Image (spheres, rainbow, N blue to C red):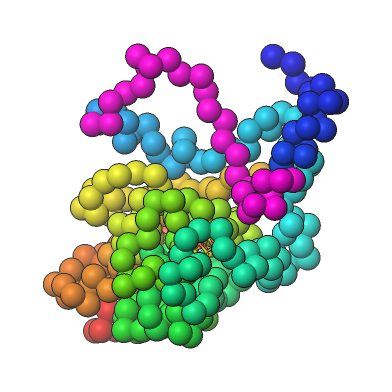
Amino acid sequence: MPHTLDPELRRALAERVRYCHEMGIYDFYRRESTTLHEIPSANQPELREEMSPKKIAVTPAIAGNNLAAIAPYPEHGAADTASALKLIREDLGDCTRCKLHQQGRKQIVFGVGNPRAELMFVGEGPGADEDAQGEPFVGRAGQLLNNMIKAMGLRREDVYIANIVKCRPPGNRQPERDECETCSPFLMRQIAAIKPKAIVALGATAAKNLLAINAPMTELRGRWYDFKPAAGDPSWPGSRLAVTYHPAFLLRDPRQKGEAWKDLQMVMKHLGIEPPKKPAEEAR
Ligand code: SF4
């Protein structure tokens, strides 16, 4: 296979990439040619196994021809993470890329926290309180998340918190697949800029979107996944991702708080955080 592109093809490709960037599309996928008989059926168990996060990590296509050099992300080359996040927010703009922009959102909820956080929490999408205040996890579920963070011996300001979609789905419904696929590239760029050591996916929707694994929570929890978005710095090894229950679920079923605490203890161990002598009761 040739390693350089014909100049005319390269020019046409650059035009196409620029057009995609204007549309907010930054991630490109290499699809290997696959004949029909090679496609495993969806219920074959090995399919899930094959979709380990490392294997599903998005890869800029035609990497050998340095596509990123043709049209890099706006935040590449930013002086620091805070500036990179600002550039991503500016690029998002007054986003109308998916239908959630016209379904009653008051504002875009970009994400909040320490740009140099070692730990990042990712939820599903903003609710009514978040939509009103422009910040993720500020309602009752947010209060419980704050307590969980405190029980870990951290402060809310120490971590970074974001969602798969940045606009409130009407009636607090789950975000739909096309909405997640349109919005999540911006979350991937936030993760790539922050480079957290650990990410906690809050709930099944966040986990399934981040990992591209369709499995119940009982299977998703209790283990680590390697995670690195395509936009990530090549010298960055990536994050480790754990899954736990969404705080809103824990409010509905407090019996599961003990299980969530086990997940957080696993994260604390990875981050080298000493278990508090007396964990906050409210997070358990
Ligand atoms: S959910 Fe994301 S992609 Fe959709 S309109 Fe809001 S910011 Fe844009």
Image coords of residue 227 (percent x, y):
48, 48
Picture quarter containing residue 37? top left
- 279, 42: nearer the viewer: 42
Say which residue appears at 46% left-offset and 65% top-offset.
100
Say which residue appears at 65% left-offset and 68% top-offset.
93
Image height check: is 168 above or below 237? Answer: below
Bounds of the magenta segment: 18-43
Asked if residue 271 lies left or right of residue 172, the reply is right
User: Is residue 235 something that shows in the picture?
Assistant: no
User: Is residue 178 something that shows in the picture?
Assistant: yes
Characterize the magenta stretch by its predominant secondary structure.
Answer: loop
- 76, 103: nearer the viewer: 103
Image coords of residue 22 (percent x, y):
70, 53
- 145, 275: nearer the viewer: 145
Say which residue appears at 72% left-offset and 39% top-offset.
16
Image height check: is 184 above or below 158? Answer: above
Picture quarter containing residue 27? top right
